[in-house]
Image: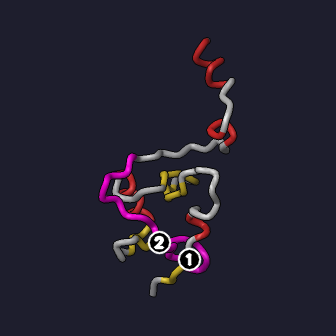
Amino acid sequence: MEQLNANTNLQGSVAALPKMAMEIPEARADAVEITALVKDEGRVSGYQLSSGLVLDKSEAVSLARQGGIKGVGISERSGNEYLKSIPDGTDSNNLGNLPSITQG
């Protein structure tokens, strides 16, 4: 019961973050960053990395899970996994604020 009370009485920035299920892998020292979103008909279909590599969603999720991409967590919606910025109170580093490219 004490654990429940401690969790419900959280204060500060962590408690203010929206509640969401997200797996946050620990990034390796050589992890890359996402530099652009690959979009197909307005929907994110992949990610361009700082190494220049372009991965589809499932490849990027797999690499992130291995610690190869920093600054992201893994979320799931309707059975589909995707990458999401780790909430830190700063909008400028959110994936949605990155440039978009089309893969042709």
- List the residue tagged with mark 1: 99
The residue lying at 39 percent from left, 74 percent from top is: 54
Residue 72: image location, x then y, percent: 48, 55
* 3 over 98 or under it: above or below: above
Q: What is the three-letter code of the residue carrying label 1? A: Pro
Left or right, 24 with respect to 20, comes to left
- List the residue tagged with mark 2: 35
Q: Quadrant of the C terminus?
A: bottom left
The residue lying at 42 percent from left, 70 percent from top is: 56
Q: Nearer the viewer, residue 91 or 60?
A: 91
Callout 2: helix, strand or loop?
strand
* Spatial separation of the CA atoms under disc 1 and disc 2: 7 Å
Numbered circle sitting on residue 30: none
The residue lying at 50 percent from left, 58 percent from top is: 82
Left or right, 13 with respect to 25, comes to right
Q: Quadrant of the N terminus?
A: top right
What's drawn in magenta, residue-wise? 26-45
Residue 61: image location, x then y, percent: 41, 58
Is mark 1 in CB contact (under 8 Å) with mark 2? yes
35 within the magenta span:
yes
Residue 98: image location, x then y, percent: 56, 72
